[in-house]
Image: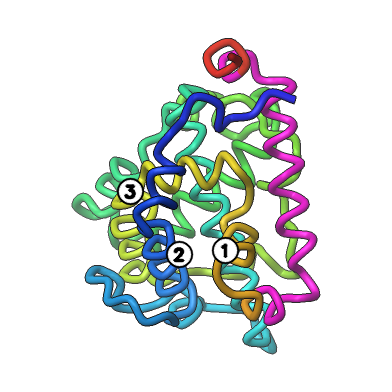
């Protein structure tokens, strides 16, 4: 199978210098605020900034936060591969411009539409046919609802900004390389801490399985990726 990581050396550099451990510390801080490495830029972890449905457990909140970071990382990977034209930083800027910032959170006004109404559907079934540059459908399942009552979640803008700025964009090359290998939560488990997977044991295989299925779908079906990154 064609692998996204072919021809990329940054991942090995990170491992050789120990920087990958620092990346996973930042990932953990953005997700649940754990680990010892002192990262500026993440003031509130996503799990504490989630507006969850009534009765949602800490495990469910953690699973949603991990799924959100996986989806953002995959979007960043697809932008790097020229499959998507979506610039998350630019979308964030537009959502906070003028009166737009009073319409709702970035997650509710932008990311929910991107995930559920655009990337999960063929373009001819979308409410706005040209939304986000008319990207291809990602039919592997990563952008379809995976958790219970997923549509009822929301995320505070300040924590979302921290995750986007410090992790997804601030560590973009490592995010891209790790996302090319698989789910960020799976990568974190393999390299640092098995406890995080235990916290979301009921959903861990669903999250990582959907990510891998989406990655395989893109490798096998989306031509720009195959042409540009097959070696």
Pointer 1: what residue? 191
Q: Which comes sooner in the sequence, label 1 or label 3? A: 3
Give the label on residue 14, or none.
none
Residue 102 vs residue 194: left or right? left
Is 215 within the magenta?
Answer: yes
**At x 69% / y 89%, what residue is drawn?**
55
Residue 211 vs residue 224: left or right? right
The residue sitting at the left extreme is: 98
Pointer 3: what residue? 169
**At x 56% / y 39%, what residue is drawn?**
180
Q: Which comes sooner in the sequence, label 3 or label 2? A: 2
Q: Give the foreground label among 1 and 3.
A: 1
**Picture layout, residue 140 above or below residue 228:** below
Q: Which quarter shows the C terminus?
A: top right
x and y percent of residue 163 in the render?
37, 62
**Picture layout, residue 7 above or below residue 19:** above
Label 2: state its secondary structure. helix
Q: Give the foreground label among 2 and 1.
A: 1
Give the label on residue 24, or none.
2
Does the magenta stretch mainly form a helix, a strand or a loop? helix
Q: Which comes sooner in the sequence, label 2 or label 1? A: 2
Is 89 within the magenta?
Answer: no
Q: Which quarter shows the N terminus?
A: top right
**Picture layout, residue 65 above or below residue 81:** below
């Amino acid at each position: 199978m064609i692998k996204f990581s072919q021809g990329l050396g940054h991942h090995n550099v990170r491992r050789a210098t120990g920087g990958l451990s620092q990346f996973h510390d930042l990932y953990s801080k953005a997700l649940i605020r754990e680990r010892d490495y002192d990262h500026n830029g993440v003031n509130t972890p996503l799990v504490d900034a989630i507006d969850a449905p009534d009765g949602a457990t800490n495990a469910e909140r953690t699973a949603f936060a991990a799924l959100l970071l996986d989806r953002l990382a995959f979007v960043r990977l697809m932008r790097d591969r020229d499959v998507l034209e979506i610039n998350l930083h630019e979308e964030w800027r537009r959502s906070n411009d003028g009166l737009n910032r009073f319409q709702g959170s970035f997650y509710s006004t932008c990311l929910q539409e991107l995930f559920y109404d655009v990337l999960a559907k063929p373009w001819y079934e979308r409410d706005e046919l040209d939304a986000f540059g008319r990207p291809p459908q990602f039919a592997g399942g990563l952008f379809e609802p995976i958790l219970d009552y997923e549509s009822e979640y929301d995320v505070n803008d300040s924590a979302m900004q921290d995750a986007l700025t410090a992790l997804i964009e601030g560590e973009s090359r490592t995010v891209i390389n790790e996302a090319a290998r698989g789910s960020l939560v799976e990568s974190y488990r393999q390299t640092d801490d098995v406890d995080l997977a235990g916290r979301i044991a009921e959903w861990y295989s669903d999250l990582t399985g959907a990510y891998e299925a989406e990655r395989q779908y893109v490798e096998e079906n989306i031509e720009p990726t195959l042409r540009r990154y097959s070696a």
